[in-house]
Amino acid sequence: MIATSDDAADRGPLRRQAAAVREMGSSFVATVLEAAERQLHQAPRTAALIAAWPRDVAADALAMRFNAALHAVARGETLPALAALYRDQAGDFDRVIGEALAVADDVIVEWMRDPPQTNEVGRTAAIMAALMVARAHHDMPCELRELGASAGLNLNLDRYVYDLGGRTVGLAGSPVRVAPAWRGAPPPVRPVEIVSACGVDLRPVDVGDAAARARLMAYIWADQHDRAARLAAALAIARERPPQVDAGDIALWLPDQLARPQPEGRCRIIVHSMALQYLDPVRRQTVEAAFRDAGARATATRPLARIGFEWTTPRDAVHLSLTVWPDGATHHLGTCHAYGAWIDWHGPTD
């Protein structure tokens, strides 16, 4: 059933997100968000923060910040009734969540002030497919750079194994297996050779810090156990092979990276997944200008590529795109599930 405009007006951001979450197959998280909105009066600080949020609540993933905060409280097991609700995924949602909101109001507020740190490993399947297409355009090793890298787990994507439309690529035997539901022909299989990888984030997540790892785990929806297991395995790999993630502003870091000398015979590839939505218009313009300037300098022996996994402007779809320079052509490779659960492939195939 599609909500009318009046229905939508009556819903707060938690209930609006609940509808989207239920459509994405997570009925437990949807029920949690619905109950939380009904009981939000029991957490006056959280309610006030949500009501007075100064920016776009969808772009800032406000409901997902709240959901992760409550999940973190449940995972901490300081509130037995809440822990049991999450463990059993059944019970008196309104009573238990209402009680938890009353107790954990301050904790939830502080959690929600920081931007989300999902570092969704499931998106690496789309990125790997795009990297293979980039290799088909420019047959050479690549320097991988990521904007909004979080813990840098996606910088380790060559340590994972993938099933992309029935084609297995990546590191055989890896404990991290990414196999999205694939719609359409499979992508072209090409060798992906990453000679260097680094990223940037305003607040990089230290994979060696147990509290930071717990925060990442809390952003996994509580009824998606496969995602949680995959994230735990990726974190274990990252502790053995720590990714390089610089602390900094994308709008400052990217122009500096693009201005650095590029060896002949290497393709410089910039990746961003669900990162640009957090930039204000001025910083977004700076990023786009940096790409244009670097693209104008690119050559056939020192090419540049850009891989985007981002919401469309109306936020009605997630598009996987690839731009390659020196020609500057942009290719719409696919439409994707926000967390990479499925990929509708529109790109080339063998």
Image: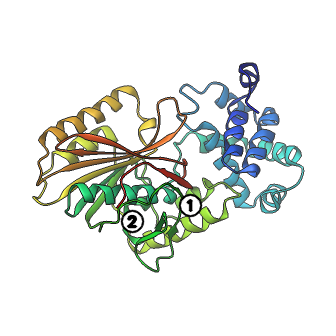
Q: Residue at x 69, y 51 (%)?
A: 25
Say which quadrant the N terminus sits in: top right
Q: How many marks?
A: 2
In the picture shown, does residue 235 fall above or below 331? below
Residue corresponding to mark 1:
211
Q: Is residue 172 left or right of residue 76?
A: left
| Image-quadrant location for residue 49 | top right
In the picture shown, does residue 172 fall above or below 277? below
Label whose residue precedes the other's in the sequence (2 or 1): 2
Q: Considering depth in this image, is 330 or 11 the residue closer to the camera?
A: 330
Residue 276, image x, y percentages: 41, 38
Q: Considering depth in this image, is 350 or 256 the residue closer to the camera?
A: 350
Say which quadrant the C terminus sits in: bottom left
| Image-quadrant location for residue 45 | top right
Residue corresponding to mark 2:
156
Q: Is residue 301 left or right of residue 187?
A: left
Q: Residue at x 13, y 53 (%)?
A: 302
Task: Identify the amino acid type marked 2.
Answer: Asn
SS state under label 1: helix
